[in-house]
Amino acid sequence: TQSQPIAASNGDILCWNGEVFDGLDVGARNDGIMLMDKIQELKLVDRRWFILKALEMIEGPYAFVYLDKKQEKLWFSRDFLGRRSLLIRHWDTQTLFLSSVAGSNDDEYKDERGGAGWEELPAQRVFCLDLRCESLPFSYSSCIATYHWAYRDQVPPVTAEAFQPTIPFGQVVLDQQQTPSDPELRLEDGFPTTSDEWRPYVDGLQAVLSQSIRQRVESIPIQDNDPSAPRVGILFSGGVDCITIAALLTQMLPQTEPIELFNVSFENPRQTKAHGASSSKYNVPDRLTGIQGWRELCRIDPLREWRFVQVDVPYSQVLEYRSHIRRLLVPSDTVMDMSIGMAIWFAARGIGNAVSDTGAETPYTGKAKVLLLGMGADEQLGGYSRHRSAWDRGGIEALGLEIRLDVQRIATRNLGRDDRVVSDTSKEARYPFLAAAVVDYLSTVPIGRKMDMRLPRGIGEKLLLRMLARRLGLMQASVLAKRAIQFGARTAKMESSNTKGQDSL
């Protein structure tokens, strides 16, 4: 464990909340210390762009604040995919707040709207505040310089007066055509076979996703000198995203090490009232697919201890923790944010019952400090209903544009919210599908080799990933349709069916 902030001998200070998975040879050393050393090395060569060049070198989730003492500048940023939270708030004419989470008591700093004024710091850009700035109040235009990241295929020439950091992947490649009579598409038992035309793409996805998972787990320390203690957990609905992560993860961990699978289910009073007490209130859709997926994993790797943890959340706990979770969501503040955030928070906390293969339940609290989540697969591989709608509206061209837009928007979506929620449980979220190498690979794969909306729901979306799941022996999971967590775990519409996801809390 490294104490923060990290100070250099010249007085520079780094506050670092992140992980370096590539770009620096960190090994077993602390990545914050290694990054500070690299920054100091680059600063000796280029005192103007040294921060941008250091960030361009590394890959991984981060939020950071860096004080350049001599030049009196404060640099701050999130990674180019927005995988870590960093909030900003201006107050009066001389105070600027930067924080991973909003304050628990912001009454002293209420703005004219009655709120605390926190905003999610935009990702895909790096900010530099000139502390000598005499233009007040603070504003992005007058005191804070902004440096935008550029996609690899859009980088302008570097000059002495301008430097733009480069994202290590380009924009999503668009297909020109796809005909319904594609002869490469052959079905066996209703599922496309992995033909010679598809096989290289499945191979490629398996290679980059395996490497991404390996980078995210190989440096996790053994807990309490116990090599049989679980180091990694997965938020597990049984869907194709998380179960494929699990099936690849088991190939790279010692066989004696358990893998925790956290499956969350909520008591929904509205659903209970509608269906009566005859059915179990926790037999929600994600519980049923989770158990099915757990059994599939036990079948493909019977020597692994797959520790399936049923996290059952009574409505009384929803009422008890809802205000706490709402504070974590800030500045996110919609009904959907609460539904999703609540499901992630309880699942990440990991308090429930471990289930044996005989069905016996034992009270259990999760031990793994690192959780793997499947975020990013839907945007890149066509998992949302809007992707099928785009296909219906305008074929492969409209679908490609929708996928490109979704990948561009990953950095502006909800990863900061999810980071705040998971971190509150003393766990760390890691996203294998959002490794730069995975995004880079999938951005170059033709749209028609990632999805095929001519096929039915549960097959055509994320077809490339489903083929990989099938290769790994996950026959049942490979044909499960996408289901949003708030509906699968039943955190949505607990009290009323009239609320809309976009409604404010």
Image (cartoon, rainbow, N blue to C red):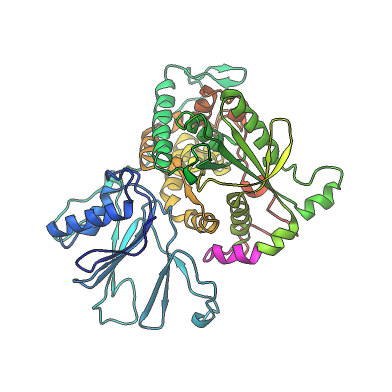
Specify whether residue 485 is in view: yes
Segment colored magenta: 322-333
Residue nearest the viewer, comparing 306 with 179: 306
Q: Outermost residue, front direction?
A: 225
- Image position, residue 361 (x, y; %): 72, 40
Q: Magenta part mainly helix, strand or loop?
A: helix
Image position of 426 (left or right of 170): right
- Image position, residue 282 (x, y; %): 75, 45
Image position of 129 (left or right of 232): left
Residue nearest the viewer, comparing 259 with 318: 259
Dividing the image into 4 quarters, which one contains the N terminus?
A: bottom left
- The answer to which quarter of the image holds residue 145 is bottom left
Specify whether residue 238 is in view: no
Q: Which residue is drawn at the image coordinates 55% and 44% (left, top)? A: 386
Q: Which residue is drawn at the image coordinates 42% and 30% (left, top)? A: 205
Dividing the image into 4 quarters, which one contains the C terminus?
A: bottom right
Relative to 265, say whether 192 is above or below: above
Relative to 86, say whether 370 is above or below: above
Question: How many callouts does the rendering have?
Answer: 0
**The stretch drawn in magenta includes residue 331:** yes
Q: Which residue is drawn at the image coordinates 53% and 45% (left, top)? A: 368
- The answer to which quarter of the image holds residue 129 is bottom left
Image position of 488 (left or right of 269): left
- Image position, residue 486 (x, y; %): 64, 50
- Image position, residue 362 (x, y; %): 70, 42
**The stretch drawn in magenta includes residue 380:** no
Image position of 139 (left or right of 190): left
Relative to 138, say whether 190 is above or below: above
